Amino acid sequence: LESIRHAKGEIIVDHMYFQPPKPVFEALVAAVKQKVKLTIITAGVTKDCPNGHLQFGPKNANHYQRLINSLEEKEKTLVTVYEFEQYKKGLHKKLLIVDGEQIFAGSSNLDYKCLVLM
């Protein structure tokens, strides 16, 4: 959370579940408002995608769309979203890169359950 708050140039979030808890969501919005580029790579929904993508893809879209909608028009250009479209196998990476120097990789999902409850 502190790394997101202190980002200066770019944040890359690569998570199957883009469902950040409120403090992370707010920190990402604040970073973009400070002119930090944000790239989100998350599960999308396609014809033959894994069940996990079917379940969580729409929720991911809801979260990143809410984030984008909370920004001014100029700020929205700083956000790029990629919906992962792998067939039969799912995106299951959990990676956060801040300013190309701080890399966080692990097994926790970027959601309330993993970051707060567990």
Image (cartoon, grey):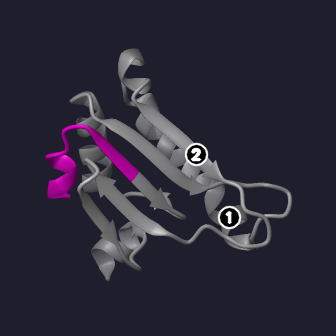
Question: To which quarter of the image does residue 114 belong?
Answer: bottom left
| Residue at the (31%, 72%) spot, across then down | 115
Find out whether residue 19 is within the magenta segment: no
Q: Secondary structure at mark 1?
A: helix
58 or 35: which is nearer to us? Answer: 35
Residue 45 place in picture, x, y as percent: 73, 55
Residue 18 place in picture, x, y as percent: 48, 57
Find out whether residue 11 is within the magenta segment: yes
The region drawn magenta spans 1-12
Q: Residue furthest bottom?
A: 118
| Residue at the (61%, 62%) spot, across then down | 56
Image mark for residue 8: none
Q: Amino acid at mark 2?
A: Tyr
Residue 88 place in picture, x, y as percent: 79, 71
Question: To which quarter of the image does residue 74 belong?
Answer: top left
41 or 23: which is nearer to us? Answer: 41
Quick one: quadrant of the C terminus? bottom left
Q: Residue furthest front?
A: 101
Q: Which residue is mark 1?
A: 53
Q: Amino acid at mark 1?
A: His
Q: Is residue 74 above or below residue 113?
A: above
Residue 110 place in picture, x, y as percent: 40, 65
Q: Which residue is mark 2?
A: 82
| Residue at the (37%, 77%) spot, across then down | 106
Q: Is residue 71 above or below residue 82?
A: above
Dots 1, 2 in contact, CB < 8 A: no
User: Alpha-carbon distance for marks 1 and 2?
Assistant: 14 Å
Q: Is residue 65 visible?
A: no
